[in-house]
Amino acid sequence: MLLWLGVVWLLCDESQAFSSVATVKPYHDECLLIRTSSEWKKDQKENPRYVWGHYELLSESADAKPLVVYISTYDMDKMLYKSKKAQASGHFDVRLEAGKRYWFCIVNHQGGHYAEDDDDYEDHPDDKPRKVGFSLDMVTHDEFDYTDLGGNPIPQKGEKISKAHEEAKERADHWMFVGRKLQMRLGAMKSHFDYLRVREADHRALTEKTFTDILTWTFAEAITVAFVAVGQIMYFRRFIERSRQYVV
């Protein structure tokens, strides 16, 4: 069963980011629709678009075994990303095509829509909801204007490329890749601290609830003890008065 998050994420030409926390009931999914712009087609080959992000299980002491996160095509014929089994957190990086729709789903039941093909399919371990934090970001790999150490442009396709130019281009490609991964890790770190704040808020709410319950029960016990004490006093008072009457 698909439970909509109530958000349709429209991916336009500019970089966009989206992050949220979803509470997924057992045997249910929480899915987000990703729709790409058809205007990408004119430069899709030169500037491919990627959606990357990460997720993290926020439920304390909860088993990650039933948790599955995946990205698929709209008709779910092709799985572009699927989290590893019993993995409480993970990263993903998926290339998207122009004018297409995709599903980003969080499943609180091992297997999800592809359970029939899973040999290790099992029932839910505890029938409890899972709180999962996630973030999605849009990355455009623009065409890079490669230059050598002297500032001269490197020849492109169809032109004669020298060995020095090839080495410079390889170095540029390498550092672009490293920069992209670094950006992804920094984003993951930022979201991790956001998730810590969510956990802190949950702990504070639980502490306040526990403290309120303790005060409530303490007040109820105090009232009960007071009534019992008053009842005992009244009982002994009547008992003493009757004893005096018998003596007289």
Image (tube, grey):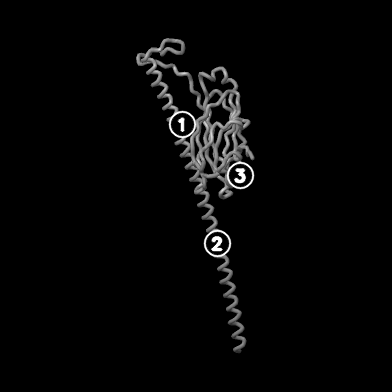
Kindly indicate whether the residue at mark 2 contacts the one at mark 3 (C-beta within 8 angstroms): no
Query: Residue flagged by tag 2: what amino acid is it?
Result: Phe
Helix, strand, or loop for circle 2?
helix
Q: Find residue 233 and report its image quarter.
A: bottom right
Report whether residue 188 is seen: yes
Quadrant assignment for the C terminus = bottom right
Vertical placement of 185 versus 219: above or below?
above
Q: CA distance from mark 3 to mark 2?
A: 41 Å
* Mark 3, other Cα within 10 Å: few <14 / some 14–19 / many ≥20: some
Report whether residue 8 is seen: no
Q: Position of residue 130 (x, y in %)?
A: 55, 45
Rendered residue at 59%/89% (across/down): 247
Rendered residue at 58%/78% (across/down): 236
Vertical placement of 149 versus 194: above or below?
above
Identify the residue position indicated by label 1 in the image: 184
Nearer-the-camera pick, 81 or 246:
81
Q: Residue furthest top?
A: 159
Q: Residue furthest front?
A: 119
Nearer-the-camera pick, 173 or 218:
173
Identify the residue position indicated by label 2 in the image: 219
Identify the residue position indicated by label 3 in the image: 27
* Mark 1, other Cα within 10 Å: few <14 / some 14–19 / many ≥20: many
Rendered residue at 58%/71% (across/down): 228
Task: Please tell me the numbered disc located at residue 83.
Answer: none
Query: Residue flagged by tag 3: what amino acid is it?
Result: Tyr
> How many labels were placed on the picture?
3
Nearer-the-camera pick, 118 or 224:
118
Rendered residue at 55%/64% (across/down): 221
Vertical placement of 207 versus 185: above or below?
below
Q: Find residue 151 and report its image quarter.
A: top left
The mark lying in front, picked from 3 and 1, is 3
